[in-house]
Image (cartoon, grey):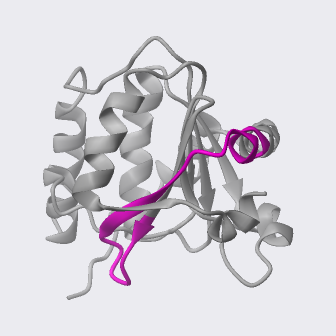
Amino acid sequence: MLERIHEITGVLLSADEYLDDFWPNFRNIDEVFWKLERIQSFREAGQASWVAMMAGDWERSLKLIDDERGGAYERGSFVRRRIRVVEEPITPYLQWEMHVLALRVADAEQVRVLDAGEVAELEVGRRLPELVVLGTSVMYEVTYDAAGTHSGARRIDDRDVIAACRGELDKLFSVGEDFRTYYEREIVPLPAPRMTV
């Protein structure tokens, strides 16, 4: 089902409409919050630490990430699970994001890492979608433009589709590598990312 999400009927939302729709549903999650991330590079212009990384100031970027510890990160009383698909070589964005995720894991988000090769059989013709699943009732295929800037989402309400996707996400999560193990082995030893203008 994950590989066919683009075929499923959904309500197209702009970036602002997505956020307006997301937060009320997020606060009413009835089960697990899921996030599937597949794209290897995004633009996060609203994140000071990302801006610092893009400017070539890696030390400042890491300090800003660390400063977010204990910040306004809505936790909720539900389980939060993320599957992060990774490709080699690690992009500067992914290196940065892994440090952000290390902070979130410390704040009780469960993250597993999957090598892109492990989802290759699901990606015939196109990559897996960027997905956010809010419990059993709402799912979003989050969209980005060619530069990796968030452009909105497609909201999918079909509970059978959501249930099927939740089952597939659970399977992927079960075979993924523990985030902390991956992070310590593959990310921590990396030198500062080299940014090109």
Q: Is residue 191 visible?
A: no
Work out whether 79 lies above or below 61. above
| Residue 35 placement, left or right of 165 | left
Would you identify the image quadrant in which residue 55 lies? bottom left
Quarter of the picture holding the N terminus: bottom right
Q: Is residue 151 magenta?
A: yes
* Closer to us: 163 or 40: 163
| Residue 53 placement, left or right of 115 | left
Q: Is residue 194 visible?
A: yes
- Residue occupying image coordinates x 68% and y 80%: 126
* Closer to us: 55 or 158: 158
Instruction: Specify start and end residues of the magenta stretch as a single range.
Output: 143-164
The percent coordinates of residue 173 (x first, y second) are: 73, 39
Q: Residue furthest right?
A: 121
The percent coordinates of residue 45 (x first, y second) are: 17, 63
The percent coordinates of residue 133 (x first, y second) are: 56, 40
- Residue occupying image coordinates x 60% and y 25%: 32
Q: Residue furthest bottom?
A: 197
